[in-house]
Image (tube, coloured by chain):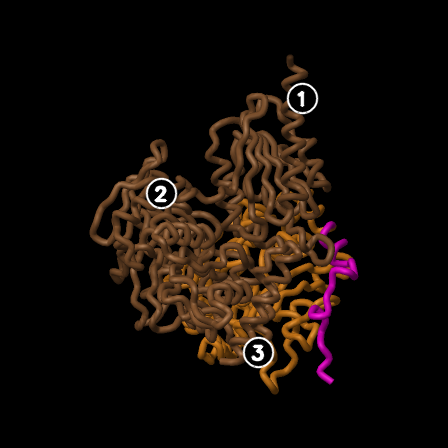
């Protein structure tokens, strides 16, 4: 107990010192804590209830929405929303939620958890509820493949943790053991869904029971959809929390909440965010929030930060779109979104991994997990590729079916903005990755904006 | 005179990780006349009933390896006969491990015999993933065009004690081989090539791919799809691979002394 107290004091003092220097102090104190007491996540006293939010996509949004909704219920919420989602960030959040004497001062903890870090975090955190949004391909180096992440999560899950899982994801929905209670959420068939998988990264194509090819009531992307096996009768789990009747134009949808049907506000019409919304509703229901108050809360929750921004410049739509390099699945969603624009398009593509430019050589295998085929469309007049690995990107585009005559390569990422042909286009896309968002994404956006403005002035 | 090639891709519904299957998509673009057979897990492989020019198996999950072993084990004699007869095989990343003597994975609690074509065994450490680059010479294309590749793997491969020399796919000039203690990477026997390098090996290495195409069909002039981009990407990567600053201590073969 003394060691725990000493750790708490050290962390609180270090956090105060770091904040006095003007930095957030959400990660380093946790590192100190784990150095002083490697088991601190389990040793520090927790709030009465703990919810872990994990998965490849959506965990930040869901954790933030849950914290916001529960605060509106007048609960004192501890969370790591301003810090990191690995063990140090979790330790910092949990210690921040106790007094100097170690007593809990929050009613509930909402912990966003990096799924790859589950082996370190979950045994000590021992959440009452864990929600998993999805498990899709991520970094080849770090995350290997979704089944590996599922194994890590299942191996580390305490028996008493209640699971809230995505029924449309046969990897995420398989989490846990016999002792874990579970409930499922899903998004019913949508007009844009297909009947069979396509694309490069499909991680569930065969029946987990008998190995025969699965059939699909609806298929959405990657391995997301509702599947069944005609050979053995296996089916995706039935969800008691479902979103359907999505009306993007009017910002409404209908939620089925464990036996009750409610019209509700559509927080955001991106499919990932529809999953986020029904997951938030499911967790709130499992926590005992009355269903009418869940629906009321959804009316006020702030929509998540989107990964794109569009502006009209001289009659042309200039779209900045985060296209996360090294993660093919994320790029596929960005390319799909780009392809959904109906007008004549030009694209600036800068998605090299910054951290591997000088001290390593990026493995571009991930580009073959991404569906560049969305970009092989006659409505895209030109794609200018910048960066160190520009020839790899150009080759990937050509293999995907993009006419090589439409591909331009240039070493400088920002200069790509100067080379793209803007005459006659309706939409210009600025695709950049995470780590070059400021160094490349912002100046490219600025250069494109200036060029579009000048083209109007020249015309007038 | 050129003839149509038959390429068999084994179990693409489970063996499709890390972009490996793009190898065959690229070969098919290089040889649009090629017949590509995609054999499902519950199908009998085409190579069992008749000749094929190339048999391919790509990267898969750990459970996928166990399924592949189960499905291929009945065909072990046929695989060995085809290898001895000169049929080309390309097994990338952890597909090679399927054909070994044993796969041991203590973290996932199994230790199973492989198909048993080759005298090596694989040991997986699920919290010890190795990431690194490899640059090495292969006889097909010589030292001026080394094969460039990457490893991201849980496993290390080693010869079963007492097994006679097991020739490698390449000898690593930089980077590690089958394991941290050797520069011999992968396995080759006749026209069988197995390598733990992952991803679009044939796309990244156009010179090697040209030699493979020539081997598969000696009577035709091999043509690379999108050759200009492929060669430019190779030259840029080769230049980076030759840059000393980009190699790290963990990418060195460790002395066993």
Horizontally, residue A31 falls left or right of residue A131, namely: right
Look at the image and give the residue range highlighted in magenta. Answer: B236-257
Q: Position of residue A262 (x, y in %)?
A: 24, 44
Q: Chain of mark 1?
A: A
Residue A425 seen:
yes
Q: Which mark is residue B120?
A: 3
Q: To which residue does mark 1 refer?
A: A454
Q: To which residue does mark 2 refer?
A: A193
Residues at circles 2 and 1 in contact by the CB criterion of under 8 Å: no
Q: Is residue A137 above or below residue A199?
A: below
Indicate the chain coloured brown by its letter: A
Q: Position of residue B257 (x, y in %)?
A: 74, 85
Foreground pick, B59 / A136: A136
Q: Which mark is residue B216?
A: none
Indicate the chain coloured orange by its letter: B
Which comes sooner in the sequence, label 2 or label 1? 2
Foreground pick, A403 / A70: A70
């Amino acid at each position: 107990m003394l060691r725990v107290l000493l750790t708490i004091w050290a962390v609180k003092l270090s956090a105060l010192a770091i904040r006095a220097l003007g930095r957030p102090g959400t990660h380093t104190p946790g590192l100190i804590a784990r150095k002083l007491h490697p088991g601190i996540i389990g040793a520090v006293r927790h709030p009465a209830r703990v919810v872990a939010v994990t998965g490849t996509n959506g965990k930040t949004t869901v954790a933030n929405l849950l914290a916001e909704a529960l605060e509106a219920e007048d609960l004192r919420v501890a969370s790591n929303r301003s810090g990191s989602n690995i063990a140090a960030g979790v330790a910092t959040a949990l210690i921040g939620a106790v007094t100097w004497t170690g007593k809990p001062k929050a009613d509930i903890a909402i912990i966003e958890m990096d799924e790859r870090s589950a082996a370190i975090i979950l045994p000590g955190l021992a959440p009452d509820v864990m929600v998993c949004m999805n498990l899709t391909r991520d970094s080849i180096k770090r995350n290997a493949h979704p089944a590996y992440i599922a194994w890590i999560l299942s191996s580390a899950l305490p028996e008493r943790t209640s699971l809230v899982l995505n029924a449309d994801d046969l990897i995420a929905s398989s989490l846990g053991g016999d002792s874990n209670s579970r409930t499922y959420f899903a998004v019913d068939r949508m007009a844009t869904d297909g009947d069979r998988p396509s694309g490069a990264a499909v991680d569930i194509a065969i029946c987990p029971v008998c190995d025969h090819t699965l059939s699909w009531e609806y298929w959405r992307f990657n391995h997301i959809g509702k599947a069944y096996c005609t050979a053995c009768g296996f089916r995706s789990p039935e969800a008691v929390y479902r979103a359907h009747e999505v009306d993007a134009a009017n910002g409404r949808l209908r939620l089925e909440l464990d036996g009750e049907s409610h019209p509700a506000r559509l927080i955001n019409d991106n499919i990932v965010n529809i999953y986020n919304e029904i997951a938030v509703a499911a967790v709130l229901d499992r926590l005992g929030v009355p269903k009418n108050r869940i629906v009321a809360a959804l009316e006020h929750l702030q929509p998540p930060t989107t990964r794109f921004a569009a502006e009209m410049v001289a009659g042309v739509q200039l779209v900045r779109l985060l296209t996360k390099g090294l993660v093919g699945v994320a790029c596929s969603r960005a390319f799909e979104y780009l392809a959904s624009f109906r007008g004549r398009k030009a694209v600036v593509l800068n998605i090299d991994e910054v951290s591997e430019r000088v001290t390593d050589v990026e493995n571009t295998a991930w580009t073959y997990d991404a569906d560049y085929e969305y970009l092989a469309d006659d409505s895209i007049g030109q794609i200018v590729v910048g960066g160190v690995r520009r020839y790899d990107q150009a080759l990937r585009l050509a293999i995907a079916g993009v006419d090589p005559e439409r591909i331009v390569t240039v070493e400088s990422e920002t200069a790509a903005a100067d080379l793209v042909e803007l005459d006659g286009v309706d939409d210009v896309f600025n695709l950049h990755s995470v780590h070059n968002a400021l160094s490349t994404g912002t100046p490219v956006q600025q250069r494109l904006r200036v060029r579009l403005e000048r083209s109007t002035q020249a015309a007038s | 005179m050129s003839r149509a090639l038959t390429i068999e891709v084994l179990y693409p519904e489970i063996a499709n990780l890390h972009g490996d299957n793009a190898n065959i998509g690229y070969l098919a673009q290089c040889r649009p006349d090629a017949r590509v057979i995609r054999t499902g897990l519950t199908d009998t492989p085409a190579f069992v009933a008749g000749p094929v020019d190339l048999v391919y198996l790509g990267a898969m999950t750990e459970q996928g390896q166990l399924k592949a072993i189960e499905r291929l084990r009945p065909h072990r004699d046929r695989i060995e006969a085809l290898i001895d007869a000169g049929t080309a095989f390309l097994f990338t990343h952890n597909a090679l491990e399927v054909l070994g003597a044993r796969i041991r994975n203590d973290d996932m609690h199994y230790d199973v015999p492989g198909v048993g074509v080759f005298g090596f065994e694989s040991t997986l450490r699920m919290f010890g993933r190795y990431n690194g680059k490899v640059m090495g010479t292969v006889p097909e294309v010589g030292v001026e065009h080394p094969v460039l590749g990457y490893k991201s793997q849980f496993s290390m491969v080693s010869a079963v004690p007492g097994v006679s020399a097991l020739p490698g796919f390449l000898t690593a000039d930089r980077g590690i081989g089958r394991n941290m203690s050797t520069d011999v990477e992968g396995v080759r026997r006749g026209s069988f090539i197995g390598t733990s390098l992952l991803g679009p090996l044939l796309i990244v290495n156009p010179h090697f791919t040209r030699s493979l195409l020539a081997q598969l069909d000696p009577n035709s002039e091999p043509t690379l799809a999108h050759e200009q981009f492929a060669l430019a990407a190779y030259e840029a990567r080769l230049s980076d691979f030759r840059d000393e600053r980009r190699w790290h201590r963990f990418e060195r073969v460790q002395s066993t002394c």
